[in-house]
Image (spheres, rainbow, N blue to C red):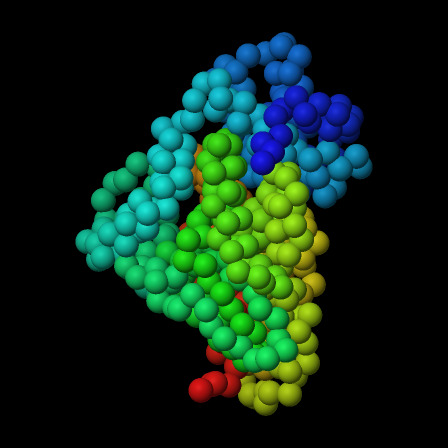
Amino acid sequence: MSKLKQLEELREEIEQCVKCGACRAHCPVFGAERREGRVARGKVALADAVLRGEVGLEAKVLEDLSQCLLCGSCEAQCPNKVPTDEIVAAARRRIAEQKGLSSFGKGLAAVLGRPKLMNALAKTSGKLSKLLFKRLPENSGLRLRFPAPYLAADRTLPPLTDRPFRERVPEVIEGKAGMPTIAFFTGCGINYMYPAIGEAFLQALKFLGVTVIIPKDQACCGLPAVSAGAGSVVEQLAVQNLAALTRRPVDYVVTACASCNAGLGKIYPDLGEDYAALGKKTRDIFVFLVELGLPEKLATLPRPEKRIKVTYHDPCHLRTRGITKEPRQILAALPQVEFVEMANAGTCCGLGGTYSVYHYETAKKIGAKKAANIGASGAELVATDCPGCIMQLQDAVNHAGGPQRAVHILELLAAALPEIP
């Protein structure tokens, strides 16, 4: 197994930055803070200076390198396609190796690296949710009753379930002969916070007759650890997930979370041939459903006179991998949905893995722009393909005082499909 790239291995990419400033117009953090250290060319220059020994890892350097969502918006607009997200992630690993993880990073690494502990903590929090949280109106989330480290009192949180998704379902759900067999990589968001998305996933694939395997021993994809700089934890989780997802022969590994899709499809391939093969097998759920012809099947369903107006938010980890068309195809084909585009659907919502934990006030500013675009679209719902984005979008809408709810497209799809015995 190879290791994640060191900062020195990205020297050539760092030198491709010509400091033209094209990234300034597209960096969400720079748009909120208007400080040069927040923009991509500033961070690349810092990484270059660290490599050359011109600056040490003092507090100002650490702060500027922490101010990145790893959203890839800069690379998409960069004439030289400088991968700032990879450079910043490698710089954070360098910081962790030389100065250690932050206190939050240590806690995150400890939990992610011990799946049984993570499971126990989530289930305990789910059982104590009525004590720990107060419910917001209109089912739009929870807020803490008591102060907690790293969580703002005004932050909207989803409920934690005391019965994780993977404990609710069998490991193998047989489909029809001649249809694909897939492994469902659930991710943490679906397993612990949004099990209804997992149920909707199964309903959609049952409708099509796909055999679904849900490995019980899969773990977190590791994206939060990438954001925190905990490289060894990412590598440990990759080993566990490779074993879990290849134990049985499958045609594809399918995700319903943009971050998980990027973890398996973008981060893991750097770790070796077996991981690259896993990445090639990985499909986003809506890419997979379009490949199986679901939009054409949805077109045959009766359309009600009154439809619900829905807009779509592009998760960064799908947008940067070129997955933008397929989720819209499914949304537009749903019989009960009137699909409307919103302005700047592809801009980051402000979550950024651990970013919104460290920099919640800036994350709120970024989210406020997204909430304004959602409101201006006239939509009642904002749909997306990422549990993390759902959490951030609902928080942004709640702060803006909007009535909209954030949902996963799969939930809308499940509502449209006929019951199957």
The quarter holding residue 179 reads bottom right
State the residue at coordinates (68%, 80%).
296
**In what quadrant of the picture does the C terminus appear?**
bottom left
- For the image, the number of numbered tags is 0
The quarter holding residue 328 reads bottom right
Query: Most extreme residue toward the top, as rendered?
Result: 54
Where residue 185 appears, as percent x and y from the top left, is 50, 57
Query: Most extreme residue toward the right, as rendered?
Result: 79
Check the image and report above or below for 118 versus 420. above
**In what quadrant of the picture does the N terminus appear?**
top right
State the residue at coordinates (62%, 10%).
53
Where residue 211 appears, as percent x and y from the top left, is 54, 72
Q: Is residue 35 visible?
A: no
Question: Is residue 41 or residue 234 the one in the foreground?
Answer: 234
In the displayed structure image, the side of residue 326 where residue 351 appears, left or right: left
Q: Is residue 409 visible?
A: yes
Check the image and report above or below for 419 versus 123. below
Question: Is residue 309 or residue 171 the one in the foreground?
Answer: 171
Question: Is residue 296 or residue 349 the one in the foreground?
Answer: 296
Where residue 303 appears, as percent x and y from the top left, is 59, 87
Where residue 419 appears, as percent x and y from the top left, is 47, 85
Check the image and report above or below for 120 versus 45. below
Question: Is residue 150 or residue 35 the one in the foreground?
Answer: 150
In the displayed structure image, the side of residue 137 where residue 218 appears, left or right: right
The quarter holding residue 160 reads bottom left
State the residue at coordinates (42%, 26%).
101
State the residue at coordinates (45%, 48%).
220
